[in-house]
Amino acid sequence: MILNRAESPCKIVTLGRSWTVAKSLCLAVCTISILTMMLPAAAWADDWPNWRGPQRNGISQEAGWNPLRLNDGPDIVWRKQIGIGFSSMAVSGDRVYAMGNTKKGGDPNDQSQTDVLWCLDAKKGGELWRHAYDSPLQPKNYEGGPNATPTVEAGRVYTLSKHGHVLCLNAETGAVLWQTHLAKDHGIDPPNWGFAGSPTIIEDLVVLNAGSYGLALRKRDGRLAWKSEKGPAGYASPVPYEWKGKPCAAILGHRELYGVDAASGRVLWKNPWTTLHDENITDPIVSGNKLFISTGLGTGSTLFEIGDTGLKELWSRKGFENWLGTSVLWQGHIYGIDSKRGAMECLDLDTGDVRWSQGGLGVGSLMMAGGRLIALSDKGRLVIAEAMPEKYVRLAWTQILDGKCWTVPVLTDGCIYARNAAGDLVCIDVSAGYSELPRVRRFPSRTR
């Protein structure tokens, strides 16, 4: 039997074989082709190598994972105690990078603390390596510990402590490649609650929310590329965007929202933005020439248009306040947690109108994967809902953690990683598994 490669697999020339055999082979080839096309989209995993994911927008493209598995209770694959803190998780390949603050150990009378960067096996939770350095817990009106999330890029992992330690380590071995200290080496002191913005890689630079208008280090060796005035910083992470072909960063600072040229640090525009107690925590969301920002404690949300010389306000509203968790922008709509109402809400980006609102999240956080919202309440309840503007549709919910949960969860490769302030890190299996992804069930919604 000869298969003519230039033709369709079903065009089979038989030599000395029956037509029945030819038909059987044709059917087998076609069946394999159809099954291949029907493989779940989750056959590939979308890494989450840094704060807010690969595009720094809080969205993963991973699909095919099964939220309905949570309705029978969480399938906890592993759990790990990583120490006190609010740093989220970075997942690259088969590794999870997470941070926490612990006591040094050894002498029980020694009360000094260390920050620990953990490298864990993503599927089993086993420790691959760790790196620790002296760092006070500093529980100032909250539990304390690290705020910023590790950033993994090109075989390296970059971290920033609340006190200003900046480290670059080999992601495979944990060996320190370079380190510097923002206060000791560059004269930049931490803000009231410590540095919280995660390191952002823009071309060959590590851009940080430090000083009045940012600071950048060379990612290869940690040398200073540029720095701004020595004023207090905000708590948000720098957000990369492009303006007229040049890489830039939008940053929510101490009392201003500003944009900088990433290569030089030149301030392109700035706009006053103040939040009670100077708690400018959430990231700007940039889409084209539009910029959305929302903060809590009575401030609310605004949509701006970015111009050559500054920002032009398009609309503003007090009724939607992101305090600790940044929203996501998806298909012309903002999805986020209104901390004032403790509700997950959907807003029309162009108008600011609320499309729906669903309570019960407190000051929780969310991300999105495969067109679904993954939210964690401040008391450890995991909620999965459709990212759709027409109405709130809950797919699944379950309790996964106890205690305070201010840290955004992460989904990658069919697993959700989540932690609480005390440092309990869990891995939840939401892979499609052996069965076909069930049809989405519709639940009654509550809207207002």
Image: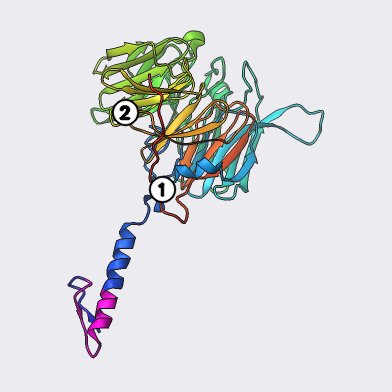
Residue 397 vertical placement versus 42 (above, below): above
Q: Which residue lies furthest to the bottom in this view?
A: 16
Q: Is residue 334 left or right of residue 96?
A: left
Q: Residue furthest front?
A: 444
Q: Is residue 236 magenta?
A: no
The amino acid type found where label 2 is placed reads: Pro
Q: In this view, does 374 lie to the left or right of 16?
A: right
User: Which residue shows up at 54% across the image and 43% down it?
Assistant: 72
User: Which residue shows up at 26% across the image and 19% down it?
Assistant: 306
Could you say where residue 428 lies in the image, as x and y percent from the top left? 54, 43
Q: Is residue 421 left or right of residue 105?
A: left
User: Which residue shows up at 48% across the image and 37% down it?
Assistant: 410
Q: What element carries label 1?
A: loop
Query: Circle 1 is placed at which residue position?
Result: 438
Specify start and end residues of the magenta stretch as a single range: 9-26
The quadrant where residue 295 appears: top left
Residue 389 disc label = 2
Q: Is mark 2 on a helix, strand or loop?
A: loop
Quarter of the image that includes the C terminus: top left
| Label 2 packing within 10 angstroms: few (<14), some (14-19), many (20+) | many
Quick one: label 2 or label 1, which is nearer the N terminus?
Answer: 2
Foreground residue among 381 and 130: 381
The amino acid type found where label 1 is placed reads: Pro
Q: Distance between the residues labelled 2 and 1?
A: 22 Å
Could you say where residue 119 lies in the image, as x and y percent from the top left? 58, 44
Q: Do the residues labelled 2 and 1 touch (CB within 8 Å)?
A: no
